[in-house]
Image (tube, rainbow, N blue to C red):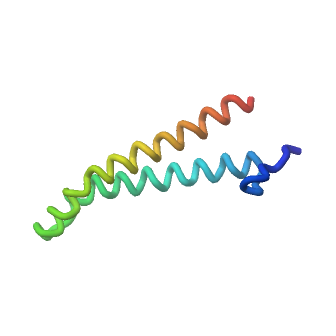
Amino acid sequence: MPKPDFRTGKSPTQANSDLLQKGILIALIGLAVLLAPYFVKSPELQAIVAASSLVGWFALVLGVALIGQYVLRRRSAR
């Protein structure tokens, strides 16, 4: 049985699972922010959401990085 991480109190498999969940969720939020201006009808709201595209790109890159970290951890565990 793997030793729990004393900083978080979670086993490594649970920590990896959490990492994957967070990565997917953050990447989906980033995609939603980037795609929202195309689906919003109001021009004022379109401008507001389009102005936050930098935040969307950051969330998308962060989510992909977390998913990549999960993949690297799974690959090294084998």
Q: Where is residue 21 drawn, in percent x and y?
A: 57, 53
Q: Residue at x 77, y 57 (%)?
A: 9
Is residue 62 shown above or below 29? Answer: above
Q: Is residue 6 left or right of residue 1?
A: left
Extreme residue toward the left, this view: 43
Q: Is residue 43 left or right of residue 14?
A: left
Is residue 33 shown above or below 61? Answer: below
Is residue 2 shown above or below 32? Answer: above
Query: What quarter of the picture does the N terminus occupy?
Result: top right
Q: Where is residue 77 drawn, in percent x and y?
A: 73, 32
Q: Is residue 78 left or right of residue 45?
A: right
Query: What quarter of the picture does the C terminus occupy?
Result: top right
Q: Residue at x 77, y 49 (%)?
A: 5
Q: Quadrant of residue 38?
A: bottom left
Q: Residue at x 81, y 50 (%)?
A: 4
Q: Residue at x 46, y 54 (%)?
A: 26
Extreme residue toward the front, this view: 7
